[in-house]
Image (cartoon, helix red, strand yellow):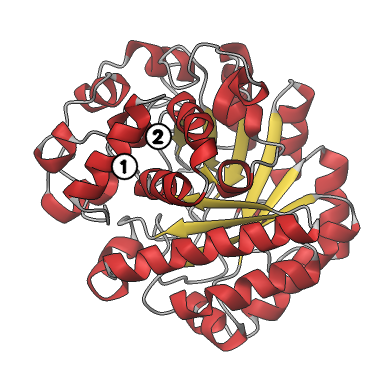
Amino acid sequence: MLNVTKLWCGASTPGDALRYGAHHNGSRPEPRHLPHHRPIVVWNLTRTCNLSCAHCYISAIHADDPSELTTNAAFGVVDQLAQYGVPVVLLSGGEPLVRRDLMDVARYAVSHGLRVGVSTNGTLITQEVARQLKEAGVYYVGISIDGPQAVNDKFRGSTGAYDRALQGVRCARALGLRVSLRFTLTAYNHRYLGEVFDLVEKERIPRVCIYHLAYAGRGAQIRARASLSHQETRQAVDICLKRADAFHRQGLVVEVLTVDNHTDAAYLMLRVAADQPHRTREVAALLKANGGNSSGVGIASIGPRGDVHADQFSHHRSFGNVRDTPFGQIWEQALDPTLAGLKARPRPLEGRCSTCPVLPICNGNLRVRAETHSGNVWASDPACYLSDRELQKVGEDMADD
């Protein structure tokens, strides 16, 4: 995640310690992306969902899967994660709220010292569900809305999805849960990005994550017609910078982030060097401390049946199963060559990425996108939208740090 509010506006935000270690307070600690740091775990508890979103990275289904982890097995996974020292678990799906034991799993995880968030489409959050989430100790709820009502409902395959999701936002906010609005950029909805920021401002939502399309699940199936051009991507990121700055100047506490295209880090460096040159060293240091893409290092995923993956978009490749081997052992041993490659510094990248001067702040971008596009997990990510000359300029700016 690229924290626009921190990097562009210079404002501190709640997730700074996780992204930059102690560096966000001005010291020089060990970078957080080193292999021995414990990952944030996105735990896809179920593949079942009540919607049929066009870009769903896990290709969620309406039917139940009897092979998913039982409640007792899920408790065992919590024990593994707590013993390994994982700092944060994000319970996701499918739609996690379709699992009747979600509150039990969340409560058990919180009781074992884990910070627990829930990633949901929001349509099942009523006042009562929000109360249960609060009482279970959930600290964060991410709710997805992909444009105004008609666009969102078509994108998500359900009339009324927008209204139900917005009601979910309001119910969660009313109970004091920290809410993040999530929006995935595609050719179908990027022109409505400004309206989404308007919604964030109107509803006083404290966090908004703008996702670039990951080529996974149904997202891989629609990539040819749904991906933005490089110019459209720049324009979208410019809107993010502009709105984050406007929120900051108005005194609104809104954390703006972009997700899943680490070219954004290099682009932001270009913009900082041009518009805020006095902050170039500061921003470069923060981006280096973050380290760019952290799939297989700072991010992990556990699938509905217990398989361990590099991130939530990489369910096509399992590194082992927590039913058979403890999560920490799978993660530390890195017996799979892809996992070992993801942990390597530098990664065994090929093509344009292999010689890129901004690797310290990008780390090869999103590997599943490169693999889906080319068939090679180490190939260049086609979503990199900067020219070689621009990348060289960013590299020179970082060298001055």
At 57% from the left edge and 47% from the top edge, which residue is drawn? 8
- Disc 1 target residue: 365
Residue 304, position as x, y percentages in the image: 48, 43
Between 259 and 132, the one lying in front of the other is 259
Lateral position of residue 163 relative to residue 275, left or right: right
- Gap in angstroms between the C-alphas marked 1 and 2: 7 Å
Q: Which mark is residue 292?
A: 2
At 18% from the left edge and 39% from the top edge, which residue is drawn? 353
Mark 1: amino acid? Asn
Disc 1 element: loop
Mark 2: amino acid? Gly
Residue 254, position as x, y percentages in the image: 72, 54
Q: Is residue 61 visible?
A: no
Q: Quadrant of residue 379?
A: top left
Lateral position of residue 271 relative to residue 257, left or right: left
At 71% from the left edge and 67% from the top edge, which residue is drawn? 200
176 versus 327 height, above or below: below
143 versus 92 height, above or below: below
Q: Tag 2: Cα neighbours inside 10 Å, few (<14), some, or many (≥20)?
A: many
